[in-house]
Amino acid sequence: MQKVGILTSGGDASGMNAAIRAVVRTALYHQMEAYGIHLGFEGLMAGNFDPMSRGSVADIIHRGGTILQTSRSQIFMTGNGREKARDELQKRGIQNLVIIGGNGSLRGGYELGKLGINVIGIPATIDNDIVYTRSIGFDTAVNTALEAINRIRDTATSHGRIFIIEVMGRHCGEIALAAGVAGGAESILIPEIETDLDEVTRKIKQGTQRGKLHSIIILAEGVYPVMELAQEIEKRTGKDTRVSILGHTQRGGTPTAVDRIMASRMGMAAVDFIVEGKRNIMVAEEGDRILPVPLQEVIRGTRTPELAMFEIARILSI
Amino acid sequence: MQKVGILTSGGDASGMNAAIRAVVRTALYHQMEAYGIHLGFEGLMAGNFDPMSRGSVADIIHRGGTILQTSRSQIFMTGNGREKARDELQKRGIQNLVIIGGNGSLRGGYELGKLGINVIGIPATIDNDIVYTRSIGFDTAVNTALEAINRIRDTATSHGRIFIIEVMGRHCGEIALAAGVAGGAESILIPEIETDLDEVTRKIKQGTQRGKLHSIIILAEGVYPVMELAQEIEKRTGKDTRVSILGHTQRGGTPTAVDRIMASRMGMAAVDFIVEGKRNIMVAEEGDRILPVPLQEVIRGTRTPELAMFEIARILSI
Amino acid sequence: MQKVGILTSGGDASGMNAAIRAVVRTALYHQMEAYGIHLGFEGLMAGNFDPMSRGSVADIIHRGGTILQTSRSQIFMTGNGREKARDELQKRGIQNLVIIGGNGSLRGGYELGKLGINVIGIPATIDNDIVYTRSIGFDTAVNTALEAINRIRDTATSHGRIFIIEVMGRHCGEIALAAGVAGGAESILIPEIETDLDEVTRKIKQGTQRGKLHSIIILAEGVYPVMELAQEIEKRTGKDTRVSILGHTQRGGTPTAVDRIMASRMGMAAVDFIVEGKRNIMVAEEGDRILPVPLQEVIRGTRTPELAMFEIARILSI
Amino acid sequence: MQKVGILTSGGDASGMNAAIRAVVRTALYHQMEAYGIHLGFEGLMAGNFDPMSRGSVADIIHRGGTILQTSRSQIFMTGNGREKARDELQKRGIQNLVIIGGNGSLRGGYELGKLGINVIGIPATIDNDIVYTRSIGFDTAVNTALEAINRIRDTATSHGRIFIIEVMGRHCGEIALAAGVAGGAESILIPEIETDLDEVTRKIKQGTQRGKLHSIIILAEGVYPVMELAQEIEKRTGKDTRVSILGHTQRGGTPTAVDRIMASRMGMAAVDFIVEGKRNIMVAEEGDRILPVPLQEVIRGTRTPELAMFEIARILSI
């Protein structure tokens, strides 16, 4: 009989619980045993395993975070760590491991796969920076950012202010682009496109001339030090400029329908791929299709955000 | 110089305002004149037109409903009505008309196109029943249904009850399927699949045996009279069974990120297609691509929901 | 050592969990033992008790419904039932019982008190119809109704329609009044004031003359058959009139700050009153003060809603 | 005929629009003329007045911010500024001015009252630091903070982390206390009570011993530099400690039922007090009653938060 382990790793993303539920229930449906591994790779190496039943994943589909908890492990990045992990799986007869996480976690999974474990990755990260697929947690994060933008828009309008809203995504402008286009922001600053403060300033001045009551700038964290940016813009425009850093509020909360459905699908597909004999792949969602992509390709790729979104923002925010 | 008229028609869908904004601003960007037409085809025939400026679509991207208002017109369904409509457009020199609405509205647009107007359709209906594309308003409606399911789940659990939640979608089970999968419902009843009350009852009884505290059934309206269904299930299971009809609350509210972005893209593409010389097409979103689809094909097609979703629900709700 | 039992009874109300948490933790703070009783009076008579620890009420303050589940019991209404209940408490040495619920539950508690148990009531019902106090769950229910009104307002405006929104409160217009005033409804129909359809119609016509795009009427359930009301108003005004029944969605959901704080205070006060030797009282919140009110007075009183709210609605909705 | 001017001043608070609506409509009901003054005292001095009709306050009761916009004025703090303001009112024959704002704005209003204008204050500030009354905007701010705490709780639990959440309230711990009690925070740090880091650390360690997965600390801004606090706690506990600064998101957003109803009542009472001949008072809500309080007393008083809340937090968070 096949056995499958499940863990969540790296930063938490909303929808991870829906994925855990789907993996467990599909595994049970196929007469497999399912084992929950606590605290990510740390728990994997420490042998922190629990058998999962139908009931153990009841009433979690709507919860943010991950009931299996998560961690970022340094030790797993070493050969010794991964051998320990493999041993823990093998001594329980668990041949398959579903890893729910981001790029770093999938990279770890790829390395573990070389040691003989069949690793199936499920992409989950609010950054949406995994190649060949959309990621669980991104839609929830963007909608959370949007709610904050809605709130700040009220204040910005009431005071006639400029607001800079810093969203997550250190290496990837996806959240900033999506929240900026959906939030009707005047400017969006992302790592993939060089920041042009002259352009930012020019748009604000143009807007003021046309009677705009406020300006909202979305900044992906790390692109520019946010306080310095505020001072610079205030100096150039002469307008009161304030900052809001959304931070960790973007991670949690009840997952959206998109994230729950994607997580349910991917979780189910992960087990179906095991049944079909696929090895060391990531479950990818491209358009409306679910595909297996070799982990090897995933870790070599680099995702570039859809820059057409930048163009949409540029034209529609005028 | 090109001129473009814009109207919203049929049932309102959240995100229509974001589409109006995108059409207007892209038109202005391309040096076109844009005219808002109030109250759908009724206003079109009555000559209820207003020139639109950048400012007239400011601060609407986050608003539900439609600032142009909407209607369902019987008269437009006649040849006389459509000739009147064409005349109103032509006497203002408006060659292009963007219609934001559902199947009925696109059908009306197709007929109007035969009279010499260039009609560009943008699919917007919470039912998501337009062929070849996703529709604006669906994601918001599903998320609103999910919120209601979350609330009812608390009550269902507290009382150990069965709840039947009726969602919209008279001819199409898309909302029911999506809300049912994302909400973790035990059973989903849709028009595309024959209702099997024995199966519904069997699942409830199984769940009760395994210690489940509640059961949630999602019903697409019109599939079964909801009160009769409740009585039948109560009789068969011996469990207290309650009904909640979500109704019109599913239509409105702030649009989600998905609906705002899709609406922005489609609105922009509608004008781009005019610039490119496309005629009498609908803007479609398939996977991540935006495509023109001839209106003729749209009105002939019939959309079938993705029944794989039904299978997902079946396996994951056990 | 003192022991205290806790149960929730009747319709669930959001904030019940926050009250349970407060009772349990305050009891433990005072070195008492705390026992959770499942499924209300049914569980009380059946001896369905569990000792509660600090951890057993962790992470519940933000959850709707009640982790102890609830029921409506016919048997407890008989003398035999209550004697059984008293025996179950006495054989465990539990002298004090905290009952979290509405008027019916407090009445049951009063009767049980006559048999020698010290009963402390905590008022929890979305109807807010308990005399001398505000009730847990009301603020959440009103805010949920408001969200629905916001959504429906979008649709009502888009179509220029009249909407009748039926809210809970069969014998008490509190939810209707609060949701109506806060939602800016044109008319509010409650059991405490005779419905004047001429007045309702007159306001709609006046509004239409002044260019109002929609009318929203809030109806407390049971005041008038909602479908008949819609037909009557449609007939009299000639305007499209739709209905939305909020139903059970008003009960659940994450409690608001007001409900969580009131529940925390009342739960703590319930135990403090036990420590002070109070017997057979309800914890009441009047203004900013927490007071003990004899259960005897509670069950005799009849609450009348603040009809000044009706006057506010009348003047502000013009 | 009486005339009444209305302005909003200082930081915006959710519910200000509901108050504006109530003042305007009650004034019209009493046959007064109502004038909206834009941008607070700045607009007052600049003569930025507009007559208000019933329609000009339609569909604003549910909007955050203020349609009249607001400002913080230095010039109005001088005698010359206030004389200019008085002249602008008198030359239009406006004898009464309703000021919706916080302590600074009421102080300005008191000074203006000395120059012969009848000033009626309506307390509106998310800080809830005005004496003798609750303030409009506070309930919305606390509920917004709670939503953020809910989201962060998911992440905190998933990673087993400590989170410090900084809320608004530089001189007043009201938001921190309410959000802390309602959010089930382990510690609450406010300006009114000296911070005891040993106690904070002790509670975290105790919690960890009892198996708690996370700790949440609520910090009123300005009490302690938040980054230093995080480092200190991380050092003392050895646990990963993160920071989230809620900032301006607390100000805006759709007002809650409590804020809309309070604003409607106070706005109506403001005009009623004018009709009754009251002069230079603030409308106060104490318990369930609306009272006039002389502005002179308001500006002399100092509000102390209800420290019983601190005790509730201490006992219930164990």
Image (cartoon, coloured by chain):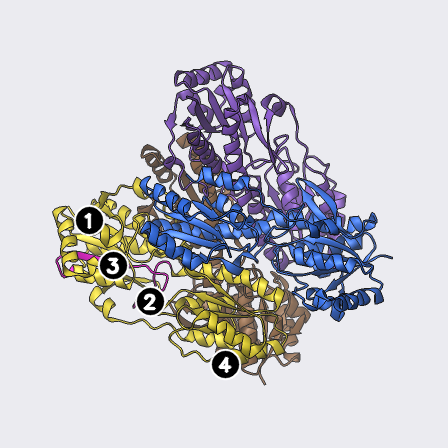
Chain colours: A yellow, B brown, C purple, D blue
Q: N-terminal of the two: label 2 or label 4?
A: 2
Q: Are marks 2 and 4 on the same chain?
A: yes
Residue at the spot x=37%, y=75% of the render?
Answer: A192
Mark found first going from the N terminus, 1 or 4: 1
**Occupied quadrant, residue D121:** bottom right
- Please, which chain is the residue tagged with disc 1 on? A
Whether residue B255 is visible here, answered yes or no, is no
Q: Which residues are magenta?
A: A113-137
Task: Give the image quarter of residue A270.
Answer: bottom left
Q: Are marks 1 and 4 on the same chain?
A: yes
Q: Are marks 1 and 4 in contact (CB under 8 Å)?
A: no
Residue type beneath disc 1: Ala
Picture coordinates of residue C153, whole percent (x, y): 61, 54
Q: Residues within 10 Å of mark 2 (few under 14, many from 20)?
A: many
Amino acid type assigned to the residue bearing label 2 in the image: Asp
Q: Secondary structure at mark 1?
A: helix
> In the displayed structure, would residue B189 be above or below residue A72?
above
C-alpha gap between disc 2 and disc 3: 14 Å
Q: Earlier in the sequence, mark 3 or mark 1?
A: 1
The residue tagged 2 is A129
Q: Label 1 vs label 2: CA separation?
A: 29 Å
Residue bearing mark 3: A121
Left or right of residue A78: residue B198 = right
Give the number of the disc on residue A199: 4
A142 vs C300, left or right, is left
Which residue lies under the disc numbered 1? A46
In this view, the residue farthest toward the right is D1
